[in-house]
Image (cartoon, rainbow, N blue to C red):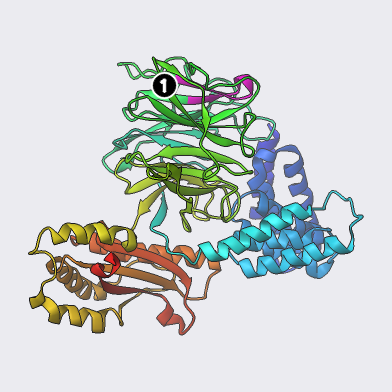
Amino acid sequence: MKLYGKIVLCFLFIFLSVKLIAQDPELAKIYLEQADQVYAEAKDAIEIAKDIYIQAAEADTMNIRANYMAGVLYLETVNRDYSTKYFERVKRLDPKYRFNIDYLLGRGYQYGLEFEKALKYFLAYKDKLRSDRSYRGRDKTSVYEVNDRIEECQNAKEIIGMPSSYTIENVSENVNSTWPDYAPVLNEDETVMIFTSRRQEGNTNENVDNDNFYFEDIYISKRQGVTWSKAKNIGQNINTLYHDSNLFLSSDGKTLYIYSDEGNGDIFYSTENEQEEWTKPVPLEGRINSQGFAEQSIWVSDDNEFMMFASNRPGGYGGFDIYGCYIEDGQWKRPFNMGPEINTRADEDGPYMAKDGVTLYFSSKGHKGFGGFDVFTTTYNGKTEKWNKPENLGYPVNTVDDEVYFHPTADGERGYLASVREEGLGFTDIYMVTHVGNLEKTAKDRISKLKERDNDFITDEQLEVKRLIDSVLNISAYQVYFEVNSSEIDESHDQKLIEMANFLKSHQNLGVQISAFASSDGNPKYNYELSNRRAQSVLKFFKENGIESDRLAARGFGILKGSEDKSRKAEVKILDLSRFEE
């Protein structure tokens, strides 16, 4: 029997045969020994190792090493904010157990969106570095990394308080697995999704790589109505025994661009024939692939005359930069750097141009973000011939983890990306991002169009209604209350919300701002997610009752201080959109 199988059986035996009592140091030793064996010899079972370390830490809360390892493995996997519980124990038991324990605590709180606590520990660790400059142990984190984390927390405090016009949800258990799934690409009508996975199921290679995950393979899923089909391996013409990952899918779904390890990282492509078979990938022609440097991620225009890609070739502003390239006489010409408005001294990746031809989405470690890669958007200014300052898409799209390879849909209403989330199935999952309104951006266009249709715009005869809106509805808001941990709208609110929807139908210049909250029962990250789900529920109610997306905006704000039962709510406020026209 393989070691992995022995571990699973032993793990199950422990849980089924031993009743865990409050404190049992001897049992903790058994768990710790078993967890060490798992972690040392079968790191593809890292989640099992983590669970056993947790059991050891709970069996003996005074066991420093068990608590330390539980915290470390939380930071290495998912639910990283849970690490703080165990690191706090370590610090109480022995503040000198690890030199960088304050840094590790800061990371845990940063992942949990508790930025003030994170900053407290990062600053404490920075003081420790100053007081012991000669320390050279392996458990030392450099001051440069600490400074980056401090800057990220300061950025995040500002970004998380800004309005976000998106919500995010897991696409499907048919697509995602308990293994890393990422890099989703879709055709224009969103009927085909191709992505990269390191899952065991269907993998071309039954063995794991050096990092103890299965080799990357490319998988495909097709949408049937609103349901994605069970993902399957795309086939051996594309997938090999080693790493294979996708980069971009053409709008018609017939050309797939692929990353290859050849040449330190080159771009290949494959085409689908009438039998729905993919050809063996060949290198991209022209001057895109460089000698000895990596090209990763690519976007190609529908007319196949312009592309963007990321590369770490010499001459850039930092690590990986985003480059552009035009085609002339059927040949891709010399690539050019997209400029300092987009590229920074850090890494940029995953460029994707929207259908309007002027809006660019990309991921960056260098622009103002939460930490790791964040998704940004910018627009091209034809007058100045420069890109505008990139904007962070904000929470909940971006988190402290990496968000990269954002794929917007043709209508701009949705997008797809991979991310590590608490509600995920395992490691990285693929999520659908839904646009939920930004009245400041949509109101001007809507009011301008309404002015061309006098019967739809507010008239002098409707001034009394306008005064009512200004004096009452803009000041007070209808409160939709929720049960504990729930985002489902109670039917007692249906009648009032329907009345509001009917009123909006009669007055096309009005919109709705939905602000949702949670009580302080859970941790900050959970409360942000819950409040966002509540906001989305109310927004969905209005859309299902005939209110257009450009009249709606919704956002969760996390915790609302006050009476707990009055904090679990969404405030629904009617706004006069013409105010945004000024």
Residue 299: quadrant of the picture: top left
Label 1 environment density (alpha carbons within 10 Å; few <14, some 14–19, many ≥20): some
Which amino acid does the dot numbered 1 rest on? Ile
Name the residue at 82% across, 52% down: 139
Quadrant of the rendered structure where residue 501 is? bottom left
Where's residue 90, x and y in %?
Answer: 78, 64
Q: Is mark 1 on a helix, strand or loop?
A: strand
Q: Mark 1 points at which residue?
A: 327
| Location of the C terminus (image quadrant) | bottom left
**On the image, which quarter does residue 451 sit in?**
bottom left
- The span picked out in magenta is 258-269
Where does the N terminus fall, quadrant-wise? top right
The residue shown at (52%, 74%) is 521
Vertical side of 367 occupied by 493: above or below: below
Residue at image location 62% in from the left, 58% down from the top: 152
In-front residue for pair 151/557: 151
Figure check: 196 above or below 147: above
- The percent coordinates of residue 497 (x first, y second) are 22, 72
| Left or right, 136 with reference to 109 | right
Side (left or right) of 582 relative to 200? left
Residue 367 screen position, x and y as percent: 56, 50
567 lies above or below 389 = below
Residue 436 in magenta stretch: no
* Lateral position of residue 40 relative to residue 261, left or right: right
Pinpoint residue 187: horizontal percent, then vertical percent.
34, 33
